[in-house]
Amino acid sequence: MDKFFKLAVEEAIKGLSEGGIPVGSVLVHDQIVLGKGHNRRLQDGSVILHAEMDALENAGRLTENIYSECSLYTTLSPCVMCSGAILHYKIPRVIVGENKNFKGEEELLKSRGVRINVLQDPDCIKIMSDYIAANPKLWQEDIGIS
């Protein structure tokens, strides 16, 4: 397993251990982790802190030339909000742990030139499917289904 993807999985597990939704993300530039995070909506009562948003927030303000050379690792396919941030900051590459439980805006990202690599990691699939089965209402809230 790629060391950066492994960090994203560790973030997902950390989020789950905090009582949150198990999605993790890591922003990497030139083999250096700039920011990592996990879904913190439940823990912080936030409406926007999906894992990708948390990783970007934790990376701090960066210049466009840095973002445009980054890779974003995420354990789950990015939703429309997170995909918007990826496009806004011109992040060119996203490595996705799985999209079986939720397929986000991969086609939108691809249509705008973002390279997507979906791993279909069995551990990510199981973590999310177990969470969704145990917490369907929280999951639906997280992805915007009422």
Image (tube, rainbow, N blue to C red):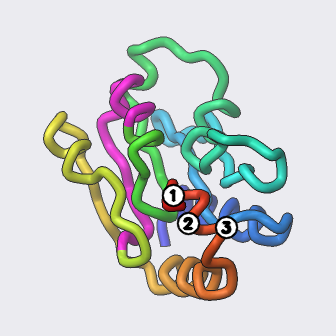
Kind of residue sitting beneath label 3: Leu
Q: Earlier in the sequence, mark 1 or mark 3?
A: 3
Kind of residue sitting beneath label 2: Gln
Kind of residue sitting beneath label 1: Ile
Callouts 2 and 3 close, C-beta under 8 Å: yes
Callouts 1 and 2 close, C-beta under 8 Å: yes
> Residue 57 versus residue 5: which sits nearer the camera?
57
Quadrant assignment, res 18: bottom right
Whole-number angstrom distance, CA of label 2 to CA of label 3: 5 Å
Q: Which residue reaches farthest left? A: 111
> Residue 118 versus residue 132: which sits nearer the camera?
132
> Residue 135 versus residue 32: which sits nearer the camera?
135
Q: Which residue is mark 2?
A: 140
Depicted 143 relative to depicted 36: above or below? below
Within 10 Å of disc 1 (Cα), the crowding (few <14, some 14-19, many 20+) is: some
Residue 112 forms part of the magenta stretch: no
Q: Secondary structure at mark 1?
A: helix
Query: Where does the C terminus fall, quadrant-wise?
Result: bottom right
Q: Which residue is mark 3?
A: 138
Report the residue at 68% width, 86% height from top. 134
Residue 94 forms part of the magenta stretch: yes
Within 10 Å of disc 2 (Cα), the crowding (few <14, some 14-19, many 20+) is: few
Report the residue at 46% width, 40% height from top. 81
Whole-number angstrom distance, CA of label 1 to CA of label 2: 5 Å
- Image coordinates of residue 48 in percent, x first then y, are 63, 39
Q: Which residues are magenta?
A: 84-99
* Count of all numbered marks drawn on residues in the image: 3
Q: Which residue is mark 1?
A: 143
Within 10 Å of disc 3 (Cα), the crowding (few <14, some 14-19, many 20+) is: some
Report the residue at 39% width, 44% height from top. 80
Q: Secondary structure at mark 3?
A: helix
- Image coordinates of residue 137 in percent, x first then y, are 64, 72
